Image: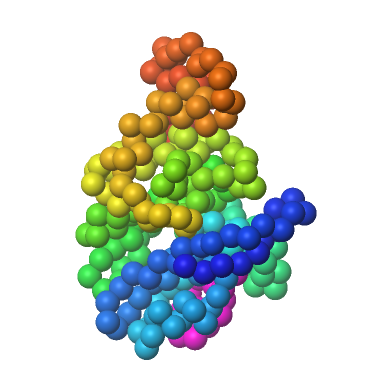
Amino acid sequence: MTEGVVDVDGVEQKVENNTWIVGDDEEVIVIDAGHDAEKVLEQVGDREVLAVICTHGLPDHVGAAIEVAARDEAVVAMHPKDKPLWRRTWPDTWPDIELEDEGVFAVADVELEVMTTPGVTHGGISLYCEELEAVFTGKTLLADGPGKLGGDYPALADQLSTIGGRLFTLAHRTRVLPAHGEETVIGELEPKFDAWLSGGLTRGAGEPEEEGPLTDGTRAARIRLNPDGD
């Protein structure tokens, strides 16, 4: 975990970020190199960094990406829709690889499959590793529910759609390894999904629950059961 300060709409906020390192004794992939390259590389040790993958383009997810990747001439990968966010931190560079849905990164004896999970940002992604029974969810899904940006949900309908349509299709035992906070498992979060759909994330204390469900089985308008649909 690393700590730093980010500017959200002109307000500085202290944040703590998880950086995940996947690999063996010889090579690794770094997921979300946050604020402190020295600390990340200390954990990597003398292992070769093959890639630095950014689940989002937000400053606290990419702040140390260039320095961590540069040590071993590794590539930096991010979804192209988050390039504008990337340029706010790194105005003179671009990521080396544009992530695509269902793309795969191999390291040691495991594979990381790219899952596009927009909501907090347009180019948010998660990385699923079947061999480790784990999914690295970035800011999309945290142990206490869908992640926010500056205390708000920028595109909650899209975020819930991708959580329900992608992440909650994984086995209940799958570990959820987010960019912030503690880990959990899919089985702990999936039962809360109906309450999120019914407005529980944005409804104030004491407000009545909306009537529902709708005819398609959801409880909120504009929620797409197919995140790739229109």
Q: Does the magenta stretch include residue 66?
A: yes
Q: Image quadrant of residue 66?
A: bottom right
Give x and y (percent) for residue 212.
Answer: 45, 12
**Figure check: 118 above or below 21:** above
Give x and y (percent) for residue 146.
Answer: 48, 41
Camera-side residue of 112 and 9: 9
Camera-side residue of 37 and 82: 37
Q: Is residue 27 magenta?
A: no
Q: Judge from the rendering whether residue 148 lies leftward or rightward of residue 227; answer left or right.
A: right
Q: Judge from the rendering whether residue 49 lies leftward or rightward of residue 57; answer left or right.
A: left
**Figure check: 29 above or below 45:** above
Give x and y (percent) for residue 147.
Answer: 51, 45
| Colour basis | rainbow
Q: Residue at left 40%, top 79%?
A: 43
Q: Does the image show residue 217? A: yes
Q: Judge from the rendering whether residue 116 lies leftward or rightward of residue 61; answer left or right.
A: left
Q: Residue at left 59%, top 39%?
A: 153
**Figure check: 208 above or below 166:** above
Q: Residue at left 61%, top 47%?
A: 149
**Magenta-drawn segment:** 63-76
Q: Does the image show residue 97? A: no
